[in-house]
Amino acid sequence: FSTYKGRMRMEKINVIHHMNEFRKILSYATNIGFFFGAGTSCAFGLPNIMTLTDECKKRLSTAEQTLFEKIEDLIANLEGKKTVSIEDVLNYIRQIRDITQGRTDYEFDGITGAQAAELDKKICEAVFNVIREKEKLVDVSDIRRFIAWFDSANRGFLKEIYTTNYDMLLEMALEANYTPYFDGFTGSYEPFFSPESIETFPREEDFTSRWIRLWKIHGSLNWMKKSKTSTSAERIVRIGKIDTPVNELMIYPSKEKYNLSRKEPFIAYFDRMKRYLQRGELVFICSGYSFSDQHINDIIFNSMRENKRLYVMVFCFSDDQLIEMSSYTTAHMNLCVMSPKRIIVNGIEKEWEYDDSIDADGGYKLYWDQAKAEFILGDFRKLIEFLIENSGRKSMIEEIANAK
């Protein structure tokens, strides 16, 4: 920072210069991976957490809504929250469920274990129905274009996507493109999770090394818990396209996902992420992720400290996200955080400035809104467009993405 007329003035960085550097990084990177948060799905019309909370609540019975509201009040009074999300509610009732072992004769805060268990299942069913209905309205053409771009980058590196989203937009796009991918499940009748299959990295001569890896680290709409039977132990299975869940859903829009990260399949995914980020040279691009999950943050920031060849690039939809991150991100030289008005690069927070005198061909329009004076790649759709336009493979990508 520099002082100007007694006030602090933030340093500026030319957005065109920086994006030219980004293009070079993409051109020369020997390994690129992605991490997607809720914002990437919101870009395609899926609800954010508070909208999801409201829509799911409406789908509960009158008695269930009354219990839901009671829990909202308890959380608001206990934690002083002005807004209580479905994540907060699920976390609270799952703690009650654990303490009471889901029993009718045990209660906490006037809520029995059986009530907590039943409301848990009903909320997850509501989440499933809301997301599935929204998914059916989504045009995944842009996601197909992203998949085509990623899959066609034939530089010999292992292509991995990590996501906290439990919707199935990525699977829809991958399969529409006929792109092979692996998610840690194996089998055909009721695919089961195979931790051994993700503990090692495939050798180059292994034909599956070209497959995209999709790791859904908070579960998925088509994961179900199969109860123990006389012939099999309790386990998590992946079902194909379903319209009505039969068994208990394995999706975790709550803090319980961290407790469950100590169990399969979550521990395997988190271990994989640690080893992936620490393997060597890697450009790791984060989009739509708010860095509000401390467990994931620890993995990313510890990996940046241990692996100096890891470079993490974070695209933020709002400046608020960057401001919240600034207190703990400026210590990392191998991190770049970008939002509409600001950037953190080389440990320094700066403001964007735009000077078109060095960009005669108008290429800035891919990443800069001149009318608003804002950087726009925090919007996942805009990021997809930027990646494709700068790939040199646009016609091939469009052909793949538009194939029926």
Image: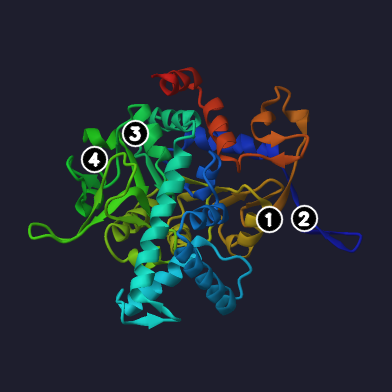
Residue type of the residue flagged with mark 3:
Gly
Marks 3 and 1 in Cβ contact (< 8 Å): no
Q: Amino acid at mark 4?
A: Arg
Residue denoted by label 2:
10
Q: In terms of image quadrants, where is residue 331?
A: bottom right
SS at badge 1:
strand
Helix, strand or loop for disc 2 = loop
User: Judging from the image, what secondary structure is the residue with disc 3 in?
Assistant: loop
In the picture of the structure, the residue carrying the numbered disc 3 is 156
Q: In 3D space, how far apart are the residues under numbered discs 4 and 1 (Cα atoms)? A: 40 Å
Image coordinates for residue 204, horizontal then vertical, percent: 25, 36
How crowded pointer 3 is (Cα within 10 Å; few <14, some 14-19, many 20+) is rated as few
- 15 or 62: which is nearer to us? 62
At a point 50% along the width and 43% down the height, the residue shown is 41
Q: Is residue 165 left or right of residue 262?
A: right
Q: 80 and 119: which one is in front? A: 119
Which of the marked residues, 4 or 3, is nearer the chain's N terminus? 3
**Label 3 or label 1, whichever comes before in sequence order:** 3
Q: Residue at x 60, y 38 (%)?
A: 21
Q: Earlier in the sequence, mark 3 or mark 2?
A: 2
**Residue bearing mark 1:** 349
Type of amino acid at the residue the image marks with label 1: Glu
